[in-house]
Image (tube, helix red, strand yellow):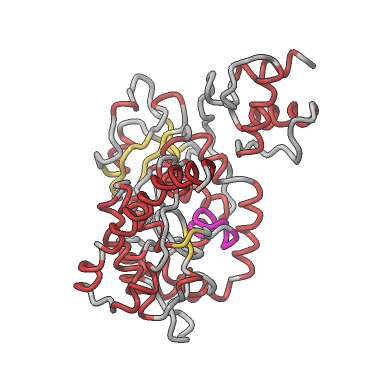
């Protein structure tokens, strides 16, 4: 054996050992799967040659609805392009949405907003194999408690024949299809709307939207009610210290000085609402209702529920929030982010039309600018970077 071959063997050993450890962990999941009614042939087909996927761990540690400032998250979620496409989806699926509203009582604008938020109307449903993603979470110890029942449910979905292994793709967390159902939610609430014998949320829009409507209905959705209202906080009130879980009737909130920003009365003053003011007194504040809490069943993030509610209002014809999100060194407004992108485009560091969405291309352009100016390189689009770009003309 040559020295090079011997060195390669040594280098491969740790990786091989890790692969063996991963496979041993996966095989250790068989007793739970068997107890749930999964056949051995199903288990073996799904786990044969399964490997650890490091991208799953990367994405598990960065979730934009938890990491980004709320204002930036909302601006990205309710973009002009998503609004334009959503309105087209409302028109294209009018007959279907008529039926779903009549059957489940869930507002069509909310259904389309969830669709837009979850997969950008089916264009970004996720390309990670669900079995591999869930096995990676379990065997790495990352969100293992969540992933174990999802893994078993995913195997049962394969066994039932709703989807085959190669097509069973989704997000890092195993969320699947047009409206991103995790396996346990799929098993409990997915719907075969078109009656073809399969609950196909991956390639069948009627099944996907009907499944979402079904899930929101059992999540205590109230037909005809709003998700919440943007409100003005009375002077002297400290909004930062109030939890949205503390409920009072809208009539009580109004008596305390919390009025809608458009000046309209609350149509259902007896409904119970909590105050959600993510930036305290320095940004928009909302009285959120039962349907906001129903949306939270989909994703336990207040930012996400706010984005779905706001996108549904905009699809219905409503306008932007009246009160502006705060800006500081690390939080640029939408207009500031667009300006920064435009200045990077002018300098040849970025391509495309500025949209205010801080994605990988913008981050890399900022890094290049920082390198060129001998600045610390972190890619973060701060107010200092914007001012420096402005000063250069």
Q: Residue at x 45, y 86 (%)?
A: 195
In the image: residue 195, left or right of residue 93 = left
Whole-percent x, y for residue 292 in the image: 37, 50
Please indicate whether residue 191 sits to the left or right of residue 73 in the image: left
Task: Give the residue furthest to the bottom.
Answer: 196
- Residue 261: percent from left, percent from top: 48, 36
18 up-or-down from 45: above or below: above
Question: Is the residue 78 above or below the residue 84 in the image?
Answer: above
Foreground residue among 166 and 101: 166
Residue 36 in the image: state x and y as whole percent: 22, 73
Q: In which quadrant of the rendered image does the C terminus lie?
A: top right
Which sits in the foreground, 55 or 189? 55
Q: Is residue 208 visible?
A: yes
Q: Nearest the camera: 377 or 79?
A: 377
In this picture, residue 211 sits left or right of residue 123: left
Q: Residue furthest front?
A: 1
* Residue visible at 53% across and 57% down in the picture: 119
Number of residue marks? 0
Tell which of 329 and 327 is nearer to you.
Answer: 329
Res. 295 visible in picture:
no
The answer to which image quadrant residue 88 occupies is bottom right
Question: Does residue 340 belong to the magenta stretch?
Answer: no
Q: Position of residue 59 (x, y in %)?
A: 45, 45
Any magenta on residue 120? yes
Most common secondary structure along the magenta stretch: helix
Q: Residue at x 28, y 79 (%)?
A: 39
| 121 to 381, vertically: above or below | below
Residue segment shown in magenta: 113-123
């Amino acid at each position: 054996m040559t020295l090079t071959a011997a060195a390669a063997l040594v280098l491969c050993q740790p990786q091989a050992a890790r692969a063996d450890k991963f496979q041993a962990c996966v095989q250790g999941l068989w007793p739970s799967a068997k107890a749930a009614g999964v056949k051995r042939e199903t288990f073996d087909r799904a786990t044969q040659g399964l490997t650890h996927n490091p991208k799953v761990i990367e994405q598990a540690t960065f979730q934009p609805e938890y990491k980004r400032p709320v204002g930036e998250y909302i601006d990205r979620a309710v973009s002009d392009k998503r609004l334009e496409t959503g309105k087209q989806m409302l028109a294209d699926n009018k007959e279907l949405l008529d039926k779903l509203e009549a059957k489940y009582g869930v507002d069509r604008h909310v259904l389309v907003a969830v669709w837009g938020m979850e997969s950008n109307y089916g264009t970004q449903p996720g390309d990670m194999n669900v079995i591999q993603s869930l096995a990676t979470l379990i065997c790495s110890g990352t969100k293992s408690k969540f992933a174990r029942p999802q893994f078993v449910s995913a195997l049962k979905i394969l066994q039932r024949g709703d989807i085959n292994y190669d097509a069973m793709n989704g997000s890092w967390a195993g969320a699947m299809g047009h409206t991103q159902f995790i396996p346990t939610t799929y098993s409990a609430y997915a719907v075969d709307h078109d009656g073809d014998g399969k609950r196909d949320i991956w390639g069948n829009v009627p099944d996907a939207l009907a499944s979402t409507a079904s899930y929101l209905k059992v999540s205590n959705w109230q037909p005809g009610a709003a998700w919440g209202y943007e409100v003005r906080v009375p002077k002297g009130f400290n909004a930062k210290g109030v939890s949205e879980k503390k409920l009072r009737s809208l009539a009580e909130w109004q008596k305390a000085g919390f009025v809608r920003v458009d000046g309209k009365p609350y149509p259902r003053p007896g409904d119970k609402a909590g105050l959600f003011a993510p930036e305290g007194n320095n940004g928009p504040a909302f009285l959120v209702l039962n349907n906001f809490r129903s949306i939270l069943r989909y994703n336990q993030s207040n930012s996400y529920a706010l984005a779905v509610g706001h996108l549904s209002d905009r699809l219905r014809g409503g306008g932007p929030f009246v009160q502006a999100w705060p800006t500081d060194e690390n939080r640029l407004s939408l207009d500031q982010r667009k300006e920064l992108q435009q200045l990077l485009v002018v300098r040849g560091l970025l391509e495309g039309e500025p949209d205010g969405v801080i994605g990988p291309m913008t981050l890399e352009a900022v890094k290049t600018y920082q390198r060129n100016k001998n600045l610390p390189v972190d890619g973060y689009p701060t107010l200092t970077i914007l001012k420096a770009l402005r000063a250069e003309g």
